[in-house]
DNA sequence: TGACGACCATCAGAGCTCTGATTAGTGTCT
DNA sequence: AGACACTAATCAGAGCTCTGATGGTCGTCA
C-alpha cells in the first residue's frame, strides 16, 4: 500500500509532489497511539471501564475531592469532556459528587467503593500493558524514545502555523 | 504534579504500588499524539476540513473510485467510521458517490472539484506541519524514532492480554 | 460597595470512533 | 441449484472530544 502511494506520486508529474504516508512521522505516531489505545481499552474493559474513565478514576483515587476542572487538566482533556466522563462514571455508581463545603460553585468528586474496586481491577491489567511495553525496551532505549517524543512535542508547540 | 504522584505513591504503603504517569511510555505517546492531532486540526481547519476528512480526501485523490471499505482500511478506521466521515464530506459537496457499474453493492467515491480544492489548500498547511516535524530531526534520529515506534507496535500487537 | 477578571460547571451542537447487528451482492463448492 | 463464506454498506447506540456560549461564584481593586 505504501509502495502504491509512492508510485502514484512519482507517475503523476503534473500535480505537485506530496509527502507519502510513510514519510510522515505523524502517521507512525498515530498508528502506534491507536494500537496503544486499543490495547488499553481491551485491558480495562473487563472492569467495565473505558480508558478515559480509568484515567479519571486513577487521578481521583490519588486526589479524592478534586474539582472537575482540575481533574480535566490532569487528564489532558477539556472541562466539557470531563463533564461527560464524570456523568457516565456517576450514573455507573463509580464516583460520587458533593458540593464543596466552602466554595459552593465547586463540586468535590470522589470514587465510591465500587469505583475503587473497578480501578484496582483495571489497573492490574493496564499496568500489565505498560509493563510489557517497558520490558520491550532497555532503559536507555526508553529514555531515547522519551527524549525523541519530547522533541516532537517541542517542534509542534513552537510551530508558528498554530498562530496563522 | 508528577512529583506529587510519586510521593503519594511512596507514602501510601498500604496499597499496592502503581506506575506513575511519567513512568508510562503510553502517557508520553498519548500526549504527543494529542499535540500532533491539535496541530494538524489547526492546519486543515481553514480549508473547512477535519483531520479524518483530510485523510480520506488525500487517499481519494490518489485512488478515485475506491470503495468505502477500502478507504477505511487505508485510513486505519472502521467502515462504520468511514461511513460517518463520508456522509459529512458528501453533504459538504466535497465528494460524490455513484454505484459501481459492475458490482452494484459497491459504491464508488471520488472527490469533486471543490473537494480537490479543499484538499490542496489543506495539504499545503498539513505538509507544513510534517515538514517542520521532519526538520526538527536528523535523518538518523527520524529513523531511530520510526524504529522505536515500530518496536512499541510490535510489543503491543503480540501482547497476550488482548486474547485474555 | 461595585465593577471586573478569573475560574467552575454545564448545556448545546458537531464530529469521530467504536461494537454489534442487519441487509445484500459475489463467488465457491457440493 | 443451493448452501456457505466473504465482503460491502449502513443503521443503532454508546462514548469521547472539541468549540462556543451561559450562568454562577470568588477575589481583588478602584
Image (cartoon, coloured by chain):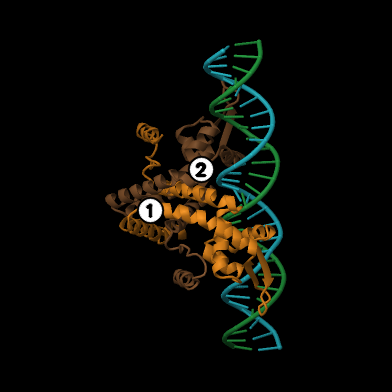
Chain colours: A orange, B brown, C cyan, D green
| B107 relative to B149 in the view: left or right | right
Tell me the chain of label 1: A
Identified at 47% across, 37% down, the residue is: B59
- Image side of residue B164 versus residue C9, left or right: left
Q: Badge 1: how crowded within 10 Å, few (<14), some, or many (20+)?
A: few
Q: Are marks 2 and 1 on the same chain?
A: no
Q: Residue drawn at (36%, 31%), measured in percent from left and top? A: A11
SS for callout 2: helix
Give the x, y percent position of residue A29. 42, 49
Residue under circle 2? B163
Q: Mark 2 Cα within 10 Å, few/some/many (few <14, many 20+)?
A: few
- Tell which of B85 and B113 is nearer to you: B85
Answer above or below: position of C25 versus A64.
Answer: above
Depicted A119 relative to depicted B160: above or below? below
Identify the residue at image location x=55%, y=56%. A122
Circle 1 residue: A135
Q: Say above or below: B14 vs B148.
A: below
Residue A82 seen in render: no
**Residue projecting furthest to the front:** B14
Q: CA distance from mark 2 to mark 1?
A: 19 Å
Q: Chain of mark 2?
A: B
Question: Observer-nearest residue: B1 or B58?
Answer: B1
Amino acid at each position: 500500500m505504501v509502495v502504491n502511494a509512492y508510485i502514484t506520486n512519482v507517475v503523476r508529474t503534473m500535480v505537485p509532489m506530496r509527502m507519502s504516508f510513510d514519510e510522515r512521522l505523524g502517521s507512525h505516531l498515530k498508528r502506534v497511539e491507536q494500537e496503544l489505545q486499543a490495547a488499553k481499552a481491551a485491558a480495562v474493559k473487563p472492569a467495565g471501564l473505558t480508558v478515559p474513565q480509568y484515567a479519571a478514576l486513577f487521578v481521583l483515587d490519588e486526589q479524592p475531592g478534586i474539582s472537575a476542572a482540575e481533574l480535566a487538566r490532569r487528564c489532558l482533556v477539556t472541562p466539557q469532556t470531563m463533564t461527560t466522563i464524570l456523568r457516565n462514571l456517576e450514573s455507573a455508581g463509580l464516583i460520587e459528587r458533593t458540593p464543596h463545603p466552602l466554595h459552593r460553585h465547586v463540586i468535590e468528586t470522589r470514587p465510591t467503593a465500587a469505583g475503587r474496586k473497578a480501578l484496582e481491577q483495571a489497573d492490574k491489567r493496564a499496568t500489565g500493558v505498560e509493563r510489557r511495553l517497558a520490558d520491550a525496551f532497555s532503559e536507555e532505549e526508553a529514555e531515547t524514545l522519551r527524549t525523541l517524543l519530547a522533541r516532537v512535542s517541542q517542534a509542534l508547540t513552537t510551530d508558528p502555523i498554530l498562530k496563522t
